Amino acid sequence: MTMQHDAPAPGRPRDDRTNTHTLPRPSEGVWPGLATPPVAPVKARIAESLFRNAVRSLPVRVVFPGGERIGAGGPDSPVMRIERPAAFFARLGAHSKIGFGESYMVGDWTSTDLPGLLTPFAATLSTLVPPALQRVARRRVEARRPREEVNSLEGSRENIHRHYDLSNDLFALFLDDTMSYSAGWFADGSDDLLLAQERKIDGILDMAGVRDGMHVLEIGTGWGGLATRAARRGARVTTLTISKEQQQLAEARLAEAGVADRVQVLLRDYREARGAYDAVVSVEMVEAVGAEYWPTYFAALDRLLKPGGRVGLQAITMPHDRMVVSQDDYTWIHKYVFPGGLIPSVTSIERNLAADTTLHVAERRSLGPDYARTLGRWRERFLDRWDDVAALGFDETFRRMWEFYLGYCEAGFRVGYLDVFQMGLARR
């Protein structure tokens, strides 16, 4: 397992944008400070007490070295095996929203059924720690979001770069042939991920009313799957990305699909977009915008849409009360996977539309259970093809990080803590 500290990788500059915040660089096997647990004996004891109290009522089995077992789970319930209790509780006590995932990354604890284990934790996420202690932790203990991860024009490009530019080849190994990195929509009785992704794309294009002869704007290109399908409907597509690596592969894939003459891939932020379009589509991009820029983002959808046009918006969501209390938190997901991200609520989307646009939600459908299935398929494919991922230069720490990310998200969608909606937006 490779766990470097603050030394830069050969040929790459050290990335210290502040004196206190040194970034993990998973594509280079650089994990600042991860190898050494924090020294926080009082916090560790508090964390252990809270953890033991919370787990006693959960349908899981937690096994300690020496054979001690806690939890309300039966013989078939998921098992959490704590290999290094002192390190685990030290990390959990120092930064609970980061330390739990970091402990998995370094092997302080393991599980043979990670999504199954995380599901009951996700179901009781808001009550595992007493609300009064949550408020104290937010004020005095928990890490706050780094200022440099705000989604300004420059900040957004860096945040996107840190995730989507890990490696095009990495994403190709676990995604389907459309390279869709968003929820699929499975037909009844079908477990085919490719068909689910094509159905999802058709669903959002239908909500936007995309048809032959239209000029469509897509905000968030991905790797060109939606633009390809829109072009095959006879539409002309302008699609925006701020990832150079995604732009290059999307253009190659569009050419291979024979639709490059109908699609223009621009390296451009949504705030820099100009023109007027018959339809606008944006799939799971709003989560990377940030609350302070939601008014700008939704106003852009309105500004870029021709009279009579519709917007197809796909958005991951969370309950509004949880979003409000957690929107300033800095979590494991922010540190290692999606810097600058914030999942909106349906209420926050509707309020921003009402305040800053002439648009409203005319129709919507939930794909939450489908996202759980999608994430499960991604995790299985990633683990099955780990040898190929490792050949790209990713280390064992990355494997556990990515497995935890996919399993953590799958658990959230399983229990409804997270949802995802396709929304058709029309003018009021």
Image (spheres, helix red, strand yellow):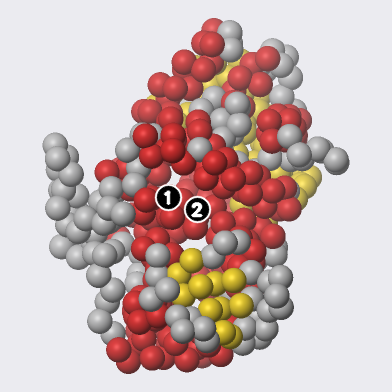
- CA gap, disc 2 and disc 1: 6 Å
Q: Is residue 343 left or right of residue 350?
A: left
Q: Where residue 81 sits in the image (x, y, percent)?
A: 51, 73
Q: Where residue 204 sits in the image (x, y, percent)?
A: 71, 35
Q: Residue at x 69, y 60 (%)?
A: 414
Label 1 environment density (alpha carbons within 10 Å; few <14, some 14–19, many ≥20): some
Q: Which mark is residue 403?
A: 2
Disc 1 marks a residue whose amino acid type is: Arg
Q: Residue at x 71, y 24 (%)?
A: 210
Give the camera-side residue of 27 and 416.
27
Q: Is residue 84 left or right of residue 413?
A: left
**Residue 418 visible within the image:** no
Give the residue pinned by disc 1: 399
Give the camera-side residue of 45 and 327.
45
| Image position of 206 with respect to 125: above or below | above
**Where, by quadrant of the figure, is residue 141 drawn?**
bottom left
Label 2 environment density (alpha carbons within 10 Å; few <14, some 14–19, many ≥20): many
Q: Residue at x 34, y 77 (%)?
A: 87
